[in-house]
Amino acid sequence: MSNRLYNILVPVDFTMKNRWAIAKAIELSNSFNCNIHLVHVTGKRSSIFNRSKQVEISLEKLVQVKDSYRQQLCGEGTLEINVLTGNRQEQLARYIQQYEMDLVVTGLPKFNLIHRIASSISISRLAKKTNVPVLAVRASGLVCHFKKIVLPVAGEIPMRQIRLAALLGRAFKSTVYFVSLRTHADDKNVNIVDKALEVVQSISTIPVQCFLLEGQNLAKSTLEFSKKINADLIMVNPVKDFRLPGLWNRITNKLLSYASKIPVVTVVSNNNNSK
C-alpha cells in the first residue's frame, strides 16, 4: 500500500452506476491530486470490423464522459480514458498492474439479483487478483468526506486496511473505529485489537476508538454499528468474512457491499504481496 494515491481506476460501462463512481473518484482526486483513469472494456466475440467499430463508438462516448466531468477537477489530477478489448476481468487486471493503479472505484447498480451476483464476484475477484483496494459506491453513498471509518478486526492485524485508513484519515481528519465481536473477545482477539490500535497510533495521529459488538456475524454487526454512528466508509478483509448470514444471502453471494448504503472498500488479506 502506497503512502498516497497516484492513480484511480473507474471501470465504465456507460450505465447510471458510473455517475456515482466517477463522482467519488473526483472527490478523492481533488483531495489527493491523483489521476483518474476511465476505462471501458469491449467484448471480443464480434468480427474484427465490428470490434473496431465498437472501440471507436466507445471511445467517442468516453470522450463525452471526460468532457462532462473535466471541470469538476480542481486539483492537479487529470482524467485519462482508454478502451480495451477482451475479457473484462483480465483486461482490467492487466491495466491495473501496467499503469500502477492504487484504487479501483466502482458503482453498484440498484437491486437486481443477476447484477448483484455478478458485481459481488467481480469485486472480490478483482481485489484478490490485483492486490488493489476496490471501493464500491452506490447512489446513496455519496458522502462528501470519510469522517468516520469503520474497520472490523478478526483473526489478524489488518495492516493494509490500517495503512489505507491512516492515509484517508490524514486527508479527511477522520476517526477510525476498530470493531470486533464480543463473542470472539477471548484473550487472543482482544490482543489483536490492542495491537491494531498500537499500529495505527504508531503511523498516524488520527483518533481511534475500539468497540466490542454483540452478535454472531461480523458483517451484520459491523453494518448495524456503522449505521448507528452514521459511518462514511467501511473497510472489509478478507472477503469471506463479510458475507451476510442466511441461506438466501449465501445463494445470492450477498457481500456487505450490497447490504450497505455506506461505501465499502474491499482490501485483500495481508498474506498477499503489498503494493
Image: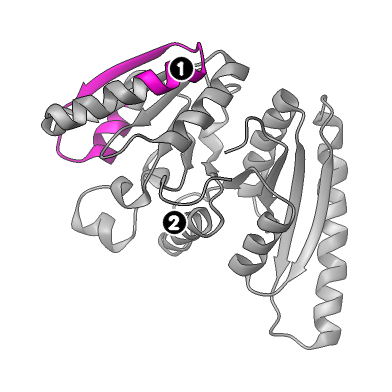
Lower sequence index among marks 2 and 1:
2
Query: Count the marks: how many?
Result: 2
Which residue is label 2 attached to?
A: 120
| Residue 208 within the magenta-colored segment of the rendering | yes
Residue 90 in the figure: left or right of residue 223: right
Residue at image location 65% in from the left, 48% down from the top: 18
Answer few, some or many: residues within 10 Å of disc 2's Cα (few below 14, many 20 plus, some between 14 and 19). Answer: many
What is the secondary structure assignment of the residue under circle 1?
helix
Q: What span is in magenta?
A: 198-225
Residue identified by numbered label 1: 202
Name the residue at 47% across, 44% down. 267
Q: Amino acid at mark 2?
A: Ser
Residue 112 in which image quadrant: bottom left
- Alpha carbons under labels 2 and 1: distance apart: 34 Å
Q: Residue at x 20, y 25 (%)?
A: 190
Q: Position of residue 181 (x, y in %)?
A: 19, 31
Q: State the image quarter where residue 70 is shown.
A: top right
Instruction: Let me know if residue 255 is in the magenta part.
Output: no
Instruction: State the quadrant of the C terminus.
Output: top right
Give the image location of residue 242, x and y in percent.
32, 46
Label drawn at residue 18: none
Q: SS for tag 2?
A: helix
Please name which of the two marks, 2 or 1, marks the residue nearer to the observer.
Answer: 1
The amino acid on which the numbered mark 1 sits, given as a three-letter code, is Ser
Q: Is residue 261 visible?
A: no
